Amino acid sequence: MKAQMHCFYLLTLLILPIYATARGGKHSGLDADGWQPITNITDESVQKIGQFAVFEFNKRSNSSLLFERVVKGESRFSDGFYYRLFLEAKHGAKTRNYKAIVLDQPWAYVRKLTNFNAV
């Protein structure tokens, strides 16, 4: 099973750049930096990455934000899957907007918050 997962991730690493290059035309949905909109923003995996971002931010900053939802997102691939998420979280009684960037490398069991800011 572990070998199958490694094979899947290796194939993904090989095919994704080819796919992105082939779709890199004028109407591909990619911006100049290679970010592509996440179309199913309510997907459980996207929401979990948003939860992770808030959890990590709280841990690092000794804060107590409460995750509400991801409202918009983009992704791209370079040395892993990067997610740029625009999310809502409660700060006290007020809901505020934040932008988080998360690196996900499932083949290496790595998920890391690289940036988190209020917007």
Image (cartoon, rainbow, N blue to C red):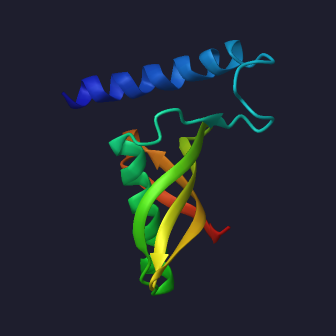
Query: Camera-side residue: 8 or 63?
Result: 63
Q: Please tell me whether residue 52 is drawn above or below residue 60 in the rendered image.
A: above
Q: Is residue 110 visible?
A: no
In the picture, which quadrant includes the N terminus?
top left
Give the total number of marks visible in the rendering.
Answer: 0
Q: Quadrant of residue 20?
A: top right
Q: Residue at x 44, y 25 (%)?
A: 10
Q: Residue 85's spot in the image, x, y percent?
A: 56, 52
Query: Camera-side residue: 88 or 21?
Result: 88
Q: Residue 117's spot in the image, x, y percent?
A: 64, 70
In the picture provided, is 25 more to the left or to the right than 39? right
In the picture provided, is 55 more to the left or to the right than 91? left
Q: Is residue 119 visible?
A: yes
In the picture, which quadrant includes the C terminus?
bottom right
Q: Residue at x 44, y 19 (%)?
A: 11
Q: Residue 92's spot in the image, x, y percent?
A: 45, 86
